[in-house]
Amino acid sequence: MTDDKWWGDFSFDNQQIKSWQIGERAITIKRSVNEWNCWNFDTEDEIDQPIVQRELTDNNQESDTAEKMFGRYLENHSEGKIRILPLLADRSVVTRPATPLTLLAGESARLFISTPIWFSAQTLTDHKTLPTQQVFLDLPFWRPSDSWFGASTIDGQLCYAKYTSARVQLDHLEKRSHRAITPITVINHQHTPLVIERINVPVNLLHLYCDNHHQFWTSGITVTTENNSKNVEMHINQKVPTEVHSYELISTPRIKSETNKLIRNISNLFG
């Protein structure tokens, strides 16, 4: 992982252009007197490189065509400062391990999976009659596909789907700059093995952290199954994962829950 921090507060002069890039993948922002212009240069495949923030000039800015412009966001007068934040997805993410996992009866396991990061940009203003922060960009570096997860077309939810590794050893998990690590502890109190082909991870209920190597982490999750029950208990840990020794809180959950303990039907959590 790179030690270059690409998020935080950024100041722009008039007509100044800044870009956040992973190889050919780039999100570019330009400030004008009354607006912010944004470009989203996507790539089909994920790129395993660090996220780099750099300034551009009009000479090397190739985004002046209308079909490449992502949006224009108007203000009476732009203050010249924005906040860039990494965020977790705005829906649950369904991860599918490359090989199905079987947790034997009475056993527990701690899994490590990676979930995608979103790029957020918000204005910062001192205007007393307006919100101090207004989000004008909220998009993933690579958008997962849509997926319905649940027992039926009625009982379930719309999620994002992503093939990923589920590792029992953290060192074996591939670490990427545009992904966060989510630790999941599964406790099987059933008298039969628990087969896990897919996991529905409610990342929109989790905190996002960053360690001193600029690797992103989420809150940990503990899932407990009971014998002769179709429900599972899911506990969202309020503390940073034990694997992280030095950290910074990056963002709070998109959806605030009144409790950190949830009861879910097993078919809505595991597939």
Image (spheres, helix red, strand yellow):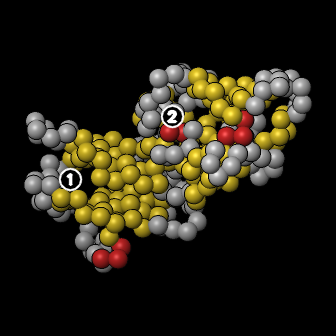
Residue 128 relative to residue 122: left or right: left
Q: Nearer the viewer, residue 72 or 91?
A: 91
Residue 84 at x, y = what percent? Answer: 34, 46
Residue drawn where x is 20% and y is 38% of the image? 132
Residue 9 relative to residue 228: left or right: left
Is the C terminus in the top left, top right, bottom left or bottom right quadrant?
top right
Give how far apart the Cα atoms at labels 1 and 2 are. 33 Å
Q: Nearer the viewer, residue 73 or 52?
A: 73
Is the N terminus in the top left, top right, bottom left or bottom right quadrant?
top right
Dot placed on the residue nearer the N-terminal end, 1 or 2: 1
Quarter of the image where one finds residue 106: top right
Neighbourhood count class around disc 2 (C-alpha, 10 Å): few under 14, some 14–19, many 20 upward: many
Q: Amino acid at mark 2?
A: Leu
Q: Residue 258: give its label.
A: none
- Residue of label 2: 205
Residue 235 at x, y = what percent? Answer: 62, 24
Query: Helix, strand or loop at disc 1?
Result: loop
